[in-house]
Image (cartoon, helix red, strand yellow):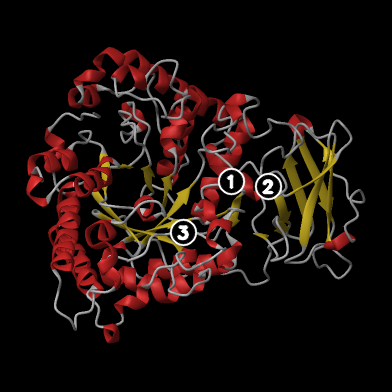
Amino acid sequence: MADHSERDEFTELPDLSEFLREDPYLVPYQEDLCRRYQLFTERLSKLEEAEGSFDDFTRSYMSYGVQRQANNSLMFREWAPGAQALFLTGDFNDWNSTSHPYTKKEYGKWELYLPPKRDKAPAIEHETKLKLVVLTSEGEELFRISPWAKYCHKHVDSNTYDWIHWDPIRPFLHQHTRPKRPRSLRIYEAHVGIASPAEEIATYTNFTLNVLPKIKDLGYNCVQLMAIMEHAYYGSFGYQVTNFFAASSRFGTPEDLKRLVDTAHSLGITVLLDVVHSHASSNTADGLNKFDGTDSCFFHSGPRGHHPQWGSRLFNYQSWEVLRFLLSNLRWWMEEYRFDGFRFDGVSSMLYHHHAMSFSGGYSEYFGMQVDEDSIIHLMLSNHILHTLYPDCITIAEDVSGMPGLCKPVKNGGLGFDYRLNMAVPDKWIQILKELKDEEWDMGNIVYTLTNRRKGEGSIGYAESHDQALVGDKSLAFWLMDKEMYTNMSSLIPMTPVIDRGIQLHKMIRLLTHALGGEGYLNFMGNEFGHPDWLDFPRKGNGESYQYARRQYNLLDPDNNLRYTQLYAFDRDMNLTEDKYGWLASQKVGDQQTFHLF
């Protein structure tokens, strides 16, 4: 971690000179860019004035939730401004809902102190089941999980998660330092739960032992882990988060995840977390929704606090305590689990009040009343703090709108991300395969799409991600070879024209994307060898089946004599060649042109 004894000096106005040279269309909006920057500096100054430093403020996970003190006493602290009273209950007091009341403090804070037992052991043992009891202004008792809970677990016969006190006697200690930040970023996008051929939920341990070696062998230097933050609904792909500080217990314990990250570091692999700060699950019993009995607390009240398309809750980024919660959440994953950065999900939804559902591409739409300035300032703060405390930290934004400056430094008027996902590229490939004959492919138009990105802003290119693998869509391999993947992939029989064409185009599409699509490259697990099935999580509509919630790495077994191994070998050689020649880090054609959204 960097020395941050003195914060960066910010001028009253950002240095926009390079920004405006690269994109002259922004000249009429200089005042808007300066205004955002000034709001950011004001917010940062207020934070440091009130809290002493953003270092302390973003370590609030060390003072909220439950904390064991040096003498084994336990201190509990929560923020529940709408509660009339707060109690702790659980296995330790036979679920008495009123025997352990919190004391009310200023600004909606609540505290509870539990001295150690007579034998000096903590009053609450490791893996004890707990709940908060919130007494509302209407006199209703609500059972809740602490927003700062570090481990939650659901029994098979239960519909909701329980808060489990996680305080192991021998916590896992990381042995390996973080790898040096890659100059060329080659990302393997992965979901731990589907990382096995077995029709079951796979584990952190399975990923550590069986998948990390494959990622290393394939030449990827970064793994991006999805669905790590606890989510009650497995089929949400991890994007309906219920418990922000808890690593998903479906795959194992927190110590298992720490071992996974540490093992990746030992292999020289950078590890990114798919972080969801754009919205939260609407669950109440095991989520943040109505935590203190009110409609607000962590979220906007009324319509602004509800996402109309996703059915989830939207954070109030202007709230001081929400800022504490979300910024501390980033620090938690960096410090406790030693992640190396984040892919921020749903950034487009954050940037605009219409959640990017109504967008035509004019520059005026990047500014004005439709833009959510609270969200923008929050993202600027998140990136500034991460890059100040961890200079090698990598942040990636999922944004389809093309917001200018998204990946420019904050001091230059940007939002501070390192990369944005080049989301137009996979759509282009799918459009070509659906609508055009092979002889109709327009290589000029393909190259234009691959290189059409904002000058001076990093992009991650990809031919397909998890979005294209989901049920209802098709992977590139499936578009190219369809049902013949099930019958004609054996290397012991003559290659059919469909398989021959499919394998060659699969390779060509990925090589073109790798070479021209961005300053980094991403692949979703299994697609490197043309995984034959779509992805469908267990649900009532498929009989709660895990048949399609898996990745069939067994297809690569040499004894199976399948042509999937040829695609795997090509993907590996492509990555290793890039590692040798470094085209991702070289100047691209896209650096020479002006970005066009439509």
Whether residue 515 appears in this view of the structure is yes
Name above or below for residue 272 compared with residue 577: above
Residue with the mark numbered 2: 63
Q: Position of residue 238 (x, y in %)?
A: 52, 52
Q: Tell me the CA gap for discs 1 and 3.
A: 38 Å
Is 435 or 85 nearer to us in this picture? 435
Query: Residue at the spot x=55%, y=51% of the render?
Result: 332
Where does label 1 land, which residue?
59
Amino acid at dot 2:
Ser
Which of disc 3 and disc 2 is earlier in sequence? Answer: 2
Q: Quadrant of residue 106?
A: top right
Mark 1 falls on what kind of element?
A: loop
Give the left or right position of residue 45, taking residue 340 as reference: right
Q: Secondary structure at mark 2?
A: loop
Look at 60% across and 40% down and name the residue there.
Answer: 325
Answer whether residue 13 is visible to the viewer in this image: no
- Name the side, left or right, on which 319 lies relative to 2: right
- Label 2 and label 3: CA atoms lie apart by 40 Å
The residue lying toward the viewer, choosing from 527 and 137, is 527
Q: CA distance from mark 2 to mark 1?
A: 8 Å
Res. 591 mark: none
Q: Amino acid at mark 1?
A: Arg
- The image quadrant of residue 123 is bottom right
Residue assigned mark 3? 536
